[in-house]
Amino acid sequence: MTDKTPPLHACDDFDPNSVHVDEARKRILDTLNTVSGIEQLAVRQCLSRVLAEDIHSTIDVPSHINSAMDGYALQGDDIPADGTASLDIIGRAMAGAPFPGSVATGQCVRIMTGAKMPQGADTVIMQENVTVEGERIIIGSGHKAGQNVRQAGEDLATGECVFSAGKLITPADLGMLASMGIAEVRVQRRVRVAFFSTGDELRSVGQPLGDGQIYDSNRYTLHGMLTRLGVELLDMGVIADRRDDIENAFQSAAQIADVLITSGGVSVGEADFVKETLEKIGEVNFWKIAMKPGRPLAVGRIGQCQFFGLPGNPVSAMVTFYQFVQPALQRLSGQAVPPPLLLKARTTSKLKKAPGRIDYQRGWLETDDRGELVVQSTGQQGSGMLSSMGKANCFIVLPLESKGIEAGSVVTVQPFAGLI
Ligand code: AMP
Ligand code: MG
């Protein structure tokens, strides 16, 4: 044999024309930029939106030095090196109602968590560590000067760049914006995503099933995955396997959406018109990706509209969405795209696999009673078995060259939680 590539066994699954998953993801991301358009919104409306401006704090948070405990505020120098000391209680400081005077040596102020530290005091002793005798307290040694006090601006300082443009806004961020007194921020407009299913066999929920027909589930899983990403959804329903219908649907989606996602019809079967229609009216990159499930994927554009043709099998559609479409939507929305979050876990199941493709098997990841991560297979792994996704909380990612894994080995997992 003159070819340097070693001959493949019949059971090998490698296709020399296939693209590696990481390479395909990189090629997709390299062509994409943030969609244009900015909106100014009230903070509560900004959850899961992407900041379009840097946010600098105009105030210190907290705005004043305050107590971190319920107790007594005093001068650190009054803490005895050994034995005890006795201090006069000269007043009270409550959260929102500061003590107006000043604390001198030998004195203290009863203080509550969040109350402004009185002038002169720099230390708080917890009430549990104090003996109260009428209008005096007795304290022992072992306390540190300056303890239990929160400094002004220790959370956010005036002028500090708190968030950079491109930040995905989380619940904590809503609270931080409110803590700075900010009522509105500028965010990127949402990415508009149109999607439809292709297939003569597909019926929508509510219609009776005829012979050989199935319900369209991909539009529902897509609805769920897209909703979590905070994009604007345009559900275009089911399109039959007819060239004209598919072309018309492509044209109308391209007028209104930034992204079009289809499922089905990207293989090389007799009713697979997605790829040829895209070739006719747009640009197409058709890839056989060295992954399982989900080998065929059509990526391209129709005018300004980015196109993803996902495979029809329900698990393949989800796996390709998470590996390629989700990062693409993150990039288009203006977010930084983190690399996939991968962890190591011990598999309690034996995992079957042929070499040649990266396998995204479905697993259940948990912590065992020794505190270690363990994963088990959800069972049957057919790409038509959506129940394998429903039972899973992670992908078990088996490398291209793997020929199967024995129970007890360490494998790579990609938790679903990190995919949202
Ligand atoms: P295709 O990619 O069109 O060749 O479809 C591959 C397999 O996925 C076939 O068994 C289809 O019936 C099934 N399929 C395609 N689209 C859907 C859908 N939207 N919902 C459920 N199954 C589908
Ligand atoms: Mg089909």
Image (spheres, grey):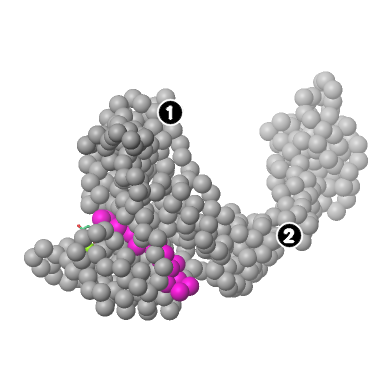
Residue position for label 2: 56
Question: Is-magenta flag for residue 312?
Answer: yes
At label 1, counting other C-alpha atoms closer than 10 Å, the crowd grade (few under 14, some 14-19, many 20 or more) is: few
Q: Quadrant of ligand 2?
A: bottom left
Q: Position of residue 54 (x, y in %)?
A: 69, 61
Part of the protein shown in magenta: 299-314
The residue that appears at 73% across and 59% down in the rendered structure is: 56
Name the element at disc 1. loop
Amino acid on which disc 2 is placed: His
Q: Is residue 239 above or below residue 381?
A: below
- Residue that label 1 marks: 372
| Residue farthest toward the front in the current orientation of the protein | 2
Q: Main secondary structure of the magenta part?
A: strand
The reply, left or right, for residue 231 in relation to residue 142 is left
The residue at 80%/36% (across/down) is: 146
Q: Is residue 359 visible?
A: no
Q: Quadrant of the N terminus?
A: top left
Determine whether, in the image, residue 223 is placed left or right of residue 152.
Answer: left
Where does residue 407 sit, x and y in percent of width and height? Answer: 30, 26
- In this orientation, does residue 185 appear? yes
